[in-house]
Image: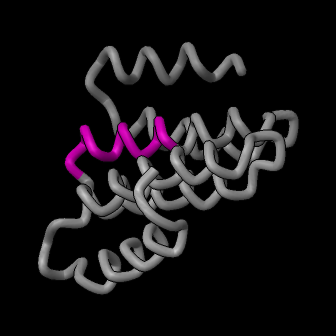
Amino acid sequence: MGFISDVLEQIKLGQYKSAAVILEENLQDLTLKPSAKIDIMEWIADCYSKEEEPGEASKWFENAARAILELPDIPQIERKRKAIKDIEKAVDCSKTPNDIERIKGLTKLKFSLGPNL
């Protein structure tokens, strides 16, 4: 994961979109554990959020939430808790009138996981 220093350098320079692009490129690394990929997805979302690209941030928080739900090595209740947090972040990023359908889909996903945990 030598790319991390490049990402941190871009963040230090305030170049969040460049940092997100580097992270996206390295997300395909087959040697990364699923949990590391989720951390990277959340980091990508944070970068887009700081870059004021809420649509991209929301998409990446949703991707992370869906990936969390597929982790076999974490108890189901913990997966749901973590996924709900990322779904809520995705909804928070989607607060424009153009995002109504996205918000509906995210809300449906959240409530399909059961009551707030």
Judging depth in this view, the residue of 77 and 36 nearest the camera is 77
Q: For this view, does 42 lie left or right of residue 49?
A: right
Residue 20 in percent (x, y) is at 45, 40
Residue found farthest to the bottom: 101
Taking the spot 20% from the left edge, 48% from the top edge, the residue there is 52
Point out the image quarter for the N terminus: top right
Write down the quadrant of residue 55 in the picture. bottom left
Residue 84 in percent (x, y) is at 46, 54
Q: Is residue 19 magenta?
A: no
Judging depth in this view, the residue of 13 and 57 nearest the camera is 57
Judging depth in this view, the residue of 13 and 33 nearest the camera is 33
Residue found farthest to the left: 97
Judging depth in this view, the residue of 13 and 81 nearest the camera is 81
Write down the quadrant of residue 27 in the picture. top right
Q: For this view, does 74 lie left or right of residue 64?
A: right
The secondary structure making up most of the magenta span is helix
Taking the spot 70% from the left edge, 51% from the top edge, the residue there is 76
Taking the spot 28% from the left edge, 45% from the top edge, the residue there is 49
Residue 15 in percent (x, y) is at 31, 30
Residue found farthest to the right: 31
Which residues are the magenta region?
A: 42-52
Q: How is the image coloured?
A: one colour
Q: For this view, does 54 lie left or right of residue 47?
A: left
